[in-house]
Amino acid sequence: MATKIQAKKKGEAKTKSVDVMVKKSQPTTTGAAVVPKATSEVEIAVPVRPKETAKEREAREQRQEVLHKMLISKRQEIIREIEESLGQSLTEDQQRRLESARDVGDQALMDLERELGISLMEMRNRRRQSIDEALTRLHDGTYGMCAECGIEISEKRLQVVPFAKLCVECQSRAELLEKIEREEDRD
């Protein structure tokens, strides 16, 4: 039995075919009535793409290669930034040890600079992890599909944020929930 799941976004309907197979156990008979067993197993198959032509396959493979190169390039750029920051931090820490803080204000400023450096480093590392996840999704064939709702992420969004795993709508919803949680934590 096949069903269609429809997702509407910005006034246009996108349809995905999903094959659903229902397996039922052999019914048991009691006297004259046939009673099916209570357990049934449901399997949902992954949507199957229609057969693609050689040109379509070649275009898809070329697009994946371009995306792969772009993601690798971004990843290398971030790793270079992390390494540069680490090198600067170590040098600055060594200089700080040699020089003693002149007053409490100088010490507070140095502490603030160090905390900002750590925050930047964490942000870059999260971005690198996001790129690694995008590369995995590209390899698995799920790149460009929203992890939340399953619809295709717009090409414009992927150009701006190539490691996006949520569509604009789901990302907005996630950010709103995160904002609400932060506000609740403050109270």
Image (tube, rainbow, N blue to C red):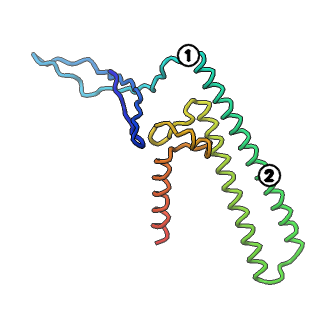
Horizontal placement of 120 versus 56: left or right? Answer: right
Quadrant hosting residue 165: top right
Residue found at x 62% / y 42%:
159
Residue type marked 1: Thr
Picture layout, residue 147 above or below residue 112:
above
Query: Dot 1 corresponds to which residue?
Result: 53
Query: Dot 2 corresponds to which residue?
Result: 83
Picture layout, residue 29 above or below residue 15:
above
Residue type marked 2: Glu
Q: Nearer the viewer, mark 1 or mark 2?
A: 1
* Disc 1, SS: loop
Residue found at x 73% / y 48%:
78
* Disc 2, SS: helix
Provide residue 138's location: percent of width, then percent of height.
61, 33
Residue found at x 21% / y 22%:
36
Instruction: In the rendered structure, find residue 78 and report the number of the disc placed on it.
Output: none
Q: Residue furthest bottom?
A: 103
Numbered disc total? 2
Q: Nearer the viewer, residue 36 or 57?
A: 57
Q: Residue furthest front?
A: 11
Picture layout, residue 39 above or below residue 181:
above
Horizontal placement of 71 versus 180: left or right? Answer: right
Q: Nearer the viewer, residue 23 or 171?
A: 171
Residue found at x 61% / y 39%:
134
- Residues at badges 1 and 2 in contact (C-beta under 8 Å)? no
